[in-house]
Amino acid sequence: MSYPYPLVIFDLDGTLVDSAADIAEALNRTLEDWQLPRVPEATVLTWIGDGVRRLVEQAFTAAHSDIDLAKVMPGFMRHYEACLLRSPRLFDGVVPALQALQARNVPLAICTNKPVAMVGPLLAHLGVQDYFAKVLGGDSLPERKPSGEPLRHIAAAFDVAPEAALMVGDSITDYRAAVDARMPVALVRYGYPRGLDLENVEAVAVMDNLQELLDL
């Protein structure tokens, strides 16, 4: 059976992988390094999606700290790497969906704002690295999501028009990137969708499980 999209591009954190607890722990260890109070995971969820520097910036702003981020980031990156494989898990339905798309010979890619060096080890740990023909991180190009440039870059690598491909994500960052790239977008309800009205957003699908991609 053919699939209506010749390329499917996935966000990572909040779409394929539940990594919130590990990201929150890395951030809280960093706050503790600077004698600042830890914050709840639920709060960290509202900051995830715009890249690691923005994540740290929001946390230190919320703590009313004016410490130079350039001094903070090396320590955060050490904690981020140390916590990367602490407890991540794939969301329900991810592997069956990837298997089914692969069986239909649909090329799959990842477009994340996570530093690209952290993506490969995470995918390998979860056993899904072989599903993806291309991976782009938040530091792979001069621009990252919500710019549409990373999505256009991936589409061009597969010789697919952005308008023909599908972006699958969970956040307003993913949505804005897809709109900027003029790429159709499908969204999941279970991720970190702060700032996104999933009931009224223009998307080809809003899903509770990635296996719903197969019904498009």
Image (cartoon, helix red, strand yellow):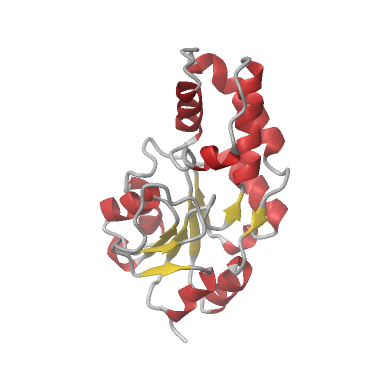
Q: Residue at x 31, y 68 (%)?
A: 164
Residue 56 in picture, x, y percent from top left: 51, 27
Question: Which residue is at the far bottom?
Answer: 1
Asked whether, in this view, residue 2 is left or right of residue 43, the answer is left
Residue 103 in picture, x, y percent from top left: 57, 78
Q: Quadrant of the C terminus?
A: bottom left
How many marks overall? 0
Observer-nearest of 84 and 138: 84
Corner quadrant of residue 168: bottom left
Q: Is residue 3 above or below residue 144?
A: below
Q: Is residue 80 visible?
A: no
Q: Is residue 11 above or below residue 98?
A: above
Observer-nearest of 101 and 154: 101
Corner quadrant of residue 161: bottom left
Residue 85 in picture, x, y percent from top left: 71, 44
Q: Is residue 187 visible?
A: yes
Q: Residue at x 59, y 64 (%)?
A: 131
Corner quadrant of residue 181: bottom left
Q: Residue at x 44, y 83 (%)?
A: 2
Asked whether, in this view, residue 97 is left or right of residue 205, the answer is right
Q: Is residue 131 above or below residue 78?
A: below
Q: Residue at x 57, y 69 (%)?
A: 98
Residue 135 in picture, x, y percent from top left: 52, 51
Q: Is residue 63 above or below residue 79?
A: above
